[in-house]
Image (cartoon, coloured by chain):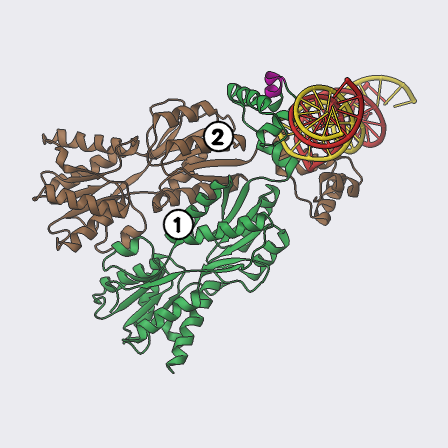
Chain colours: A brown, B green, C yellow, D red
Amino acid sequence: MGITMKDVAKKAGVSLSTVSRVINDSSLVSKDTASRVKKAIDELDYQINDSARALRTNISNLIGIIGAGMDNPFLMEVLKSVETEAIKDSYNIIYGDSEGELEQELYYINMFKQKKIDGLIILTANFSQQLIKAVKKSKIPSVFASGYLQDPDLPSVTVNNIKAAEDVSKYLLKTDDYFGIIRGPYRDSVASEERMKGIINVYKDNNIGLKEKYIAEGDFSYKSGYECAKNLIKNNPNLKSIFAFSDQMAIGAIRYCIDNQIRIPNEMSIVGFDGIEASKYVNPSLSTVFQSGTVLGTEIMKILIKKINNEEINDNKIFIPHKLIKRESSR
Amino acid sequence: MGITMKDVAKKAGVSLSTVSRVINDSSLVSKDTASRVKKAIDELDYQINDSARALRTNISNLIGIIGAGMDNPFLMEVLKSVETEAIKDSYNIIYGDSEGELEQELYYINMFKQKKIDGLIILTANFSQQLIKAVKKSKIPSVFASGYLQDPDLPSVTVNNIKAAEDVSKYLLKTDDYFGIIRGPYRDSVASEERMKGIINVYKDNNIGLKEKYIAEGDFSYKSGYECAKNLIKNNPNLKSIFAFSDQMAIGAIRYCIDNQIRIPNEMSIVGFDGIEASKYVNPSLSTVFQSGTVLGTEIMKILIKKINNEEINDNKIFIPHKLIKRESSR
DNA sequence: TGGTTTTCAGAAAACGTTTTCATTTTTAAA
DNA sequence: TTTAAAAATGAAAACGTTTTCTGAAAACCA
């Protein structure tokens, strides 16, 4: 088909080995021949064949990402950041959307294994024990995002969900006796569980009972935020505050209040989570726990590349900073 | 390293060729041996090596996407849809974010060529003539999204930008003599130019002059929407309506009005473009031109797969439907 | 000068598939 | 039965790299 190393070798009057060495910046080739080879490469517009190289070296320069909930701007920011970091080391991102289904996750792991990916990133809001097991079994260097992992072998990079939820809880309980919670899905939800833990901590510290009826289960979407707000408010007529586990759900909740003439923040305080760009612009602007998707992505790649290169990792449980930002949607 | 076809062959007591045939569902292998081979594959948990296969067949089952502006939820929806379609045909998506820089675009094209991608999707709001030329030169089956392409060889899938802009213009001119425009970047912007054309058509039909001062250049972000609204309103004290070329910019513009006690829609009508999910939930809810990112993605893949398979394509300029949705942000 | 090290370059094997071609076995036809 | 055709299998080459091993040339040292 195209131009191969053979053509370059012939044109430059050297052997295949030499061309290969030039391409890989091997030291054991003289400047003279190196430049001659480079010239030939340029003139022929030679492109290396990565399949052949991958076959021979068992290195694909591919990093797989299994994601879900990509309608979430925060995860998007992470994805973009990961890509930006990856390309600096000449890694390409190969992306699969599992929609949170285990079956699909396993399917992608399989595909990615066949593609000989060098590293794997699990970028889903939830993950099940089976997934963790499958990732471990695959032996692919991996990093989990968005939830603390018990397993000491598997690195995770995430905001400190417990601490962040504590911050929000303390803030809301300053003006209120209790607050409604719009959490993420129960199933396999690591991050949501951690945040619940933080809330429970603060409730306990204040000797308040956290009742079941304060809690609604959403799926991080605008729509579920809207519905959950409706349920919470109906079940708790005196409710004055809501903590939603994503900005999108918080915005949905705001919309419910607006549609029902509930004034924010006078009659209802709403706090979100993530600090997506939109949170600044919605009306009322949204109080939220800011975390940087860009930082998250960068940290993920840092640790993943270390794993790929078999470098020492002193700490494989990374927490990225978070900050409670108070805006118009809360008192 | 791992299990290879050789191991399977040995275990099943057949030759390499036979194993290969079983894997590829070749008809010329007896049911008996086929099931024997399959059993061996299962028992050994054999995984094909895609590098080797790609080397031999020159088919990678990889589709490259060069994207930009992935903070735009609409493009994200397209990306997700493309991935969902692709996986149905066992294609994996390999994604590069060019940030709209030609240099990076070319870099990715190069990388992708080396990876022997089977197809290429250009998913950027803007594209330059150089990019088009480079794509064409690469000989990779390609599809452009989000702007009509002159070149008869290159397929494009997009909303009918001219028509959509005409719809909005007519709508706004019903209650107004003119309106402000927050457009996309001038540089290489195909979609923005098309929309401007639509606006100009309607202005001409109504014998109105479209003045320079009605136009502000944004970059599709919330922030630029905010800034552009500021400039437009300052330069046109009597301005009553704004048409923004993305929902994000429209939401930014809304925020500017709110911050400055300009009542929407009484004193200012605002119409966006894309119909992202958030447009329903913001306050006031946003009038916008809805287009389906999912449909766009599906159509892109349909045509791309045809190109990859060298199938006849009767029409390689596809327009997807759009619909002007009137909500609270406009009269 | 002769010998030793260092530097540079080539030959050839290997990576794991697919596929062509040849061969054997089975089935069908006579 | 014998022969021809069809079906099933195997051997081996090929895809385009990297890398080990070996050898030649150049540089260094005494």
Q: Position of residue A175 (x, y in %)?
A: 10, 43
Q: Does the magenta-highlighted stretch encompass residue B143?
A: no
Where residue A201 sits, quadrant-wise, is top left
Q: Element under label 2?
A: helix
Going by the numbered disc 2, the residue's amino acid type is Asn
The Cα atoms of the two marked residues, 1 and 2, are separated by 25 Å
> Chain under label 1?
B
Q: Nearer the viewer, residue A257 or B99?
A: A257
Where is residue C20 drawn, in percent x and y? Answer: 73, 35
B240 sits to left or right of C29: left
Counting from the top left corner in percent of width and height, residue B46 is at: 54, 23
Q: Residue at x 30, y 30 (%)?
A: A188
Say what amino acid the circle numbered 1 marks.
Glu
Residue that mark 1 sits on: B77
Residue linked to disc 2: A110
Can residue A326 be spotted in the picture? no
Query: Any mark on residue A132, and which?
Result: none
User: Which residue: 22% across, 36% down?
Assistant: A165
Q: Chain of mark 2?
A: A
Camera-side residue: B141 or B303?
Answer: B303
The residue at the point 24 percent across, 34 percent down is A195
Taking the image as shown, residue B25 lies to the left or right of residue D20, namely: left
Q: Residue furthest bottom?
A: B207
**Could one spot residue A219 in this view of the protein?**
yes
Examine the rendered structure and indicate whether residue A80 appears above or below residue A119.
below
* Magenta extent: B7-13
The chief SS type of the magenta part is helix
Are the residues at dot 1 and dot 2 in contact (C-beta closer than 8 Å)? no
The image shows residue A89, relative to residue B127, as above or below, that is above
Q: Quarter-wise, where is residue A90 in the image?
A: top right
